[in-house]
Image: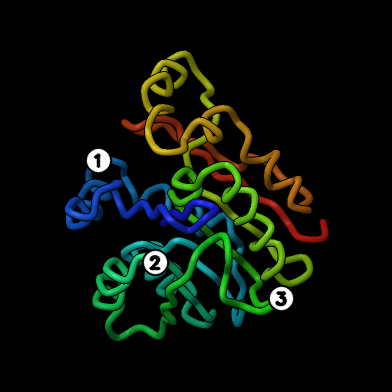
């Protein structure tokens, strides 16, 4: 999910729409998707009856995992691509999940609507201005002391991952992530308690889980 500030550029899964059918297999078999998404769910400390937003839900893998892990929570998946939302709806047959179409930089929800916002491999699609705007929007729709959990490319922690990022930083809008700027952007949006909770190494580069709280 991605949108430039003038809403003229949208980046679908894997950058090209014809690659959308390859998105799920790539994440599952190459990036060990379920491993790090399970870690994200564990970190989020979700309680019964909380309202959860999966921002940039794509084909709905994380959203469905959230719903199955926390059947008493209210789970919403939001993405800007109607094609992947159709895949998500098929994936969630038999589960009570709300699917919405919308953009990270202009969320279609009222203030203080959610207890948790989670987002996985979305932020690196956004240009810098829209990263900042997305965090401001997330802050707005979270309840007081609501929490944000980001799983995305992050700063390298080893010579290997630093080498990997020399190439990956040229793709899409990943430079902010690899330069370690995401925690700064989150803090500037008003969040407190911003920290890197975990990090992982994948074939595409380092991933981080960043957590933050509204009103901390």
Name the residue located 52 percent from the left edge and 44 percent from the top edge.
Answer: 127
| CA neighbours of label 2 inside 10 A, class few (<14), some (14 to 19), many (20+) | some
Check contact, mark 2 vs mark 1: CB within 8 A. Answer: no
User: On the picture, is 192 further left or further right than 54?
Assistant: right
Image height of 85 relative to 194, above or below = below
| CA neighbours of label 1 inside 10 A, class few (<14), some (14 to 19), many (20+) | few
Tell me the number on the disc at residue 65. 2
Residue 161: give x, y in percent of width and height: 44, 22
Check contact, mark 3 vs mark 2: CB within 8 A. Answer: no
C-alpha span from label 3 to label 2 = 26 Å
Residue 147: give x, y in percent of width and height: 68, 61
- Farthest residue, direction right: 215
Image height of 152 relative to 104, above or below = above
Q: Quadrant of residue 146?
A: bottom right
Q: Is residue 44 or residue 154 the one in the foreground?
A: 154
Residue bearing mark 3: 111
Q: Nearer the viewer, mark 3 or mark 2?
A: 3
Residue 125: give x, y in percent of width and height: 44, 46
C-alpha span from label 3 to label 1 = 38 Å
Check contact, mark 3 vs mark 1: CB within 8 A. Answer: no
Residue 148: give x, y in percent of width and height: 63, 58
Name the residue located 49 percent from the left edge and 74 percent from the top edge.
Answer: 70
Q: Quadrant of the N terminus?
A: bottom left
Query: Which numbered disc flags the more N-terminal residue, 3 or 2?
Result: 2
Q: Is residue 117 or residue 105 the one in the foreground?
A: 105
Query: Which numbered disc flags the more N-terminal residue, 3 or 1?
Result: 1
Residue bearing mark 1: 30
Q: Quadrant of the C terminus?
A: bottom right
């Amino acid at each position: 999910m991605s949108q430039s500030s003038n809403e003229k550029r949208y980046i679908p899964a894997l950058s090209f729409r014809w690659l959308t059918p390859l998105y799920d297999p790539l994440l599952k078999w190459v990036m060990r998707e379920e491993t790090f998404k399970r870690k994200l769910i564990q970190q989020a400390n979700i309680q019964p009856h909380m309202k959860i937003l999966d921002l940039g839900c794509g084909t709905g893998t994380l959203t469905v995992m959230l719903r199955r892990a926390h059947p008493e929570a209210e789970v919403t998946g939001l993405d800007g691509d109607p094609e992947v939302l159709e895949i998500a709806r098929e994936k969630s047959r038999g589960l009570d999940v709300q699917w919405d179409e919308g953009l990270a930089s202009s969320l279609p929800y009222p203030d203080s609507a959610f207890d948790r916002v989670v987002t996985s491999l979305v932020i690196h699609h956004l240009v810098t201005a829209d990263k900042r705007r997305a965090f401001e929007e997330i802050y707005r729709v979270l309840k007081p002391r609501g929490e944000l959990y980001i799983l995305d490319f992050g700063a390298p922690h080893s010579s290997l991952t630093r080498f990997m990022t020399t190439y990956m930083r040229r793709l899409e809008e990943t430079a902010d992530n690899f330069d370690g700027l995401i925690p700064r952007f989150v803090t500037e949006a008003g969040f407190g308690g911003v920290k890197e909770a975990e990090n992982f190494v994948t074939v595409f580069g380092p991933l981080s889980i960043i957590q933050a709280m509204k009103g901390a």
